[in-house]
Amino acid sequence: MSVPDSAPAGDGQSLSSLLILLAIIAGVSVASIYYNQPLLDDFRQTFPAGAAWIGAVPAATQLGYASGMLLLAPLGDRFDRRRLILLQIAGVCVALFVAATAPTLAVLIGASLAIGVLSTIAQQAVPFAAELAPPEARGHAVGTVMSGLLIGILLARTAAGFIGQYFGWRAVFGSTIVVLLGLAVVVVLKLPRSRPTSTLSYGKLLVSMWHLTVELRGLREAAATGAFLFGAFSMFWTVLTLLLAGAPFHLGPQAAGLFGIVGAAGALVAPLAGRSADKRGARAIITFALVLVVLAFLIFSFSGKSLAGLAIGVIVLDVGVQAAQISNQSRIYALRPEARSRVNTVYLVAYFIGGAIGSAVGAATWHAFGWLGVCAAGLAFTALAGWVHLGMRPGAGQGAQAT
């Protein structure tokens, strides 16, 4: 089965069906890198000698994801994305098996790194959506697929918390293998092939990303802003499990996972954020998103002993981060239509490096300064994002496009 360069503009039902399929692929695949976050206290109990290194598990996964973005995602411009997706599913299933049977924390950290590298399947789906949609609906298309990705991220924590509570953390990784194999069947039966847009060699594809970064000021701004915001986001979700495990809550991984359902509100606003970016411009939506993230961490700072306060803060945080994410991706996909996978790679490598740093800083800050220290660190990351966003104005040249 082959697919044209873009979906027919009048065939809305066909395009909608493809976007829903791509959203499912994005959500199921990206969930693999978030299963470990509500399980940190379980890892600590299984590997008590390495308790100080528990934060390295989510950090390794996110660093792996950034590495996978750099090494694998650009191939979407050069090869059929469906084939790449199937190969990555096979690889991540092997890594998940190693994680499920890990005898030591070091092995679990290594497997988590591999899971991150190979779970970049979603980053073939999002540029594909931007390719299929007409320019005036690109933000909405990206928002639709990103809503699936966000639901996968958030419900991954819920599923992992439930399975971990009743069947143990190893069963979480084992059950994920079954889900991914089912996804592979759907990909073979339903997903059309994509048409490559580049004939560059692998080495030149990688080098071209450096040139894109240097040439596109808008890409640099989006990457830095996204990295700091996702760092703040990952900081909160990494520490939440540790907060809930202690006084006064004494709650297990299932409770931490249930916060993922609360945060799913962010997924509901993703298409709306995309439409708003199409109509009002991405910069205005990102400014509003920054205000929301600041508000979220202020709410968290007063909610260290309040489940209701934490739940409200989660909704505000997820809406803010996702609104910024959709707006950033909508604008960068317009910079170089023939290089969407590579532009997306530059953005998300920075994004997940920020997430990994946020996870590591969050865990260290929690042990050194407690919950208020984590909230202060989250505000600091958000302030850096605001400094980049408000300090860089669209100028002349390629980087000024799609702002």
Image: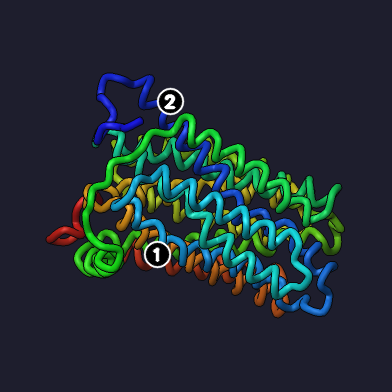
Query: Residue 96 appears at what percent x and percent y?
Result: 66, 57
User: Residue at image x 67%, y 71%?
Assistant: 55
Q: Any mark on residue 282, and which? A: none
The residue beneath circle 2 is 17
Does residue 396 appear to the left or right of 145 in the view shown?
left
Find out whether the residues at labels 1 and 2 contact each other: C-beta distance under 8 Å.
no
What residue is at 52 percent from the left and 58 percent from the top?
118
Q: What residue type is labelled 1?
A: Leu
For the point 65% across and 72% down, which residue is it?
Answer: 56
Q: Is any atom of residue 207 visible in this view?
A: yes
Q: Earlier in the sequence, mark 1 or mark 2?
A: 2
Neighbour tally class for label 1: few under 14, some 14-19, many 20 plus, Cα within 10 Å? many
Q: Where is residue 88 in the image (x, y as percent from the top left)?
A: 50, 52
Q: Is residue 178 left or right of residue 131?
A: right
Q: Which amino acid does label 2 sit on?
A: Ser
Could you say whether the residue bearing mark 2 is in a helix, strand or loop?
Answer: helix
Q: Check disc 1 and report the residue beneath it.
A: 70
Residue closer to the observer: 286 or 142: 142
Q: Position of residue 144 (x, y in %)?
A: 44, 35
Colour scheme used in the picture? rainbow
Question: Is the N terminus in the top left, top right, bottom left or bottom right quadrant?
Answer: top left
Q: Which residue is drawn at 19% across and 57% down?
A: 400
Residue 228 visible, this orientation: no
38 relative to 143 in the view: left or right: right
